[in-house]
Amino acid sequence: DWVSVIGMNNTYVGKYVIAADGANSVIAKGLGNNIRKGVAIAFMTIAHGKYLSDICVLDMTRAKWGYSWVFPRGGNEYDVGIGSLQWGNYRQRLIEYVNTLEMKMGVILGHPIPIRHRDRIVIKRIALVGDAGGFADPTTGEGIFYAMYTGIAAALALGKSRASGEFAGNYLKLVRPLIRNLSLAYYISLGTYGIDNLVMGRLGVTAFSMIDTGNLIKKVMGGKVWYPQAMRGMIKLTITRGLPLIIRRLIRF
């Protein structure tokens, strides 16, 4: 009639466990998930200097299969990082990036980003939310929205479950649309980054440099559209903007 979580110094007992212990989730691993499966990599630092004080910068051209970012924090502090679906020495790349921005490097932190949901996200009285459940956008690495979404879903499932046996089904029902959305996002992400790197990159162009592409990414990151709608927009952009751009480059060659 209860579950327990054994910590380093204490044991916690309750009727349910909502696991929000991140991408390296011990609880997700305990449920039988391979937490090293389907993860991207990111490195970040809090850099100091003078840059664009009130503008968030996303550079989709600096890292293959990923992007770099600069987020102002105030007081001449900036969250600067690089992330990619393709693992590599991004620690050194981050150091070089901060140097090009003429800022002072802070402590470098690296962390995995889950880009596919776990095989087991809920069992009986235990549910995984956020990064612990593998809920993050594979194109952008953004996970705060999905952490809030799944956390709310878990709370609603708890409130709706009159018996403990109902909880798993109620939670799955609430997060299933999100799972479908992020599953589609995974394949769209592989296709988008793949075409951009393997085809357009060889011609010296990138789809991410187009304003319309940037606007579509911002809508996805802002939660204004989900990937089924984004896919239609991407197909339209590929036909109306991408193909003509590729043809013009081929003609130049």
Image (cartoon, helix red, strand yellow):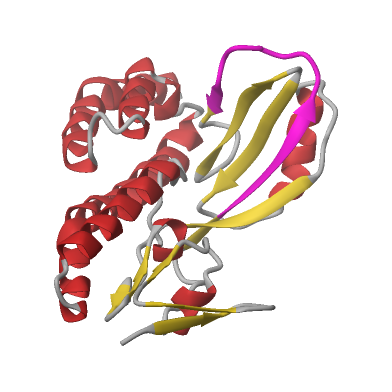
Residue at x-position 35% and y-position 54% = 151
Q: Is residue 107 visible?
A: yes
**Splitting the image into 4 quarters, where does residue 99 fall?**
top right
**Splitting the image into 4 quarters, where does residue 142 fall?**
top left
Q: Quadrant of the C terminus?
A: top left
| Image position, residue 81 (x, y; %) | 65, 38
Q: Quadrant of the N terminus?
A: bottom left
| Image position, residue 12 (x, y; %) | 52, 77
**Splitting the image into 4 quarters, where does residue 105 fall?**
top right
Residue at x-position 45% and y-position 64% = 132
The stretch in magenta equals 41-58
Residue at x-position 45% and y-position 22% = 209
Identify the residue at the far bottom of this view. Answer: 1
Say whether residue 124 is left or right of residue 30: left
Residue at x-position 55% and y-position 21% = 56
Q: Is residue 48 magenta?
A: yes
Say whether residue 230 is left or right of residue 89: left
Say whether residue 50 is left or right of residue 218: right
| Image position, residue 27 (x, y; %) | 48, 76
Taking depth in this image into account, of 241 and 244 the one nearest to the observer is: 241
Q: Is residue 129 magenta?
A: no
From the viewer's perspective, is residue 173 above or below residue 26? above
Q: Is residue 137 visible?
A: no
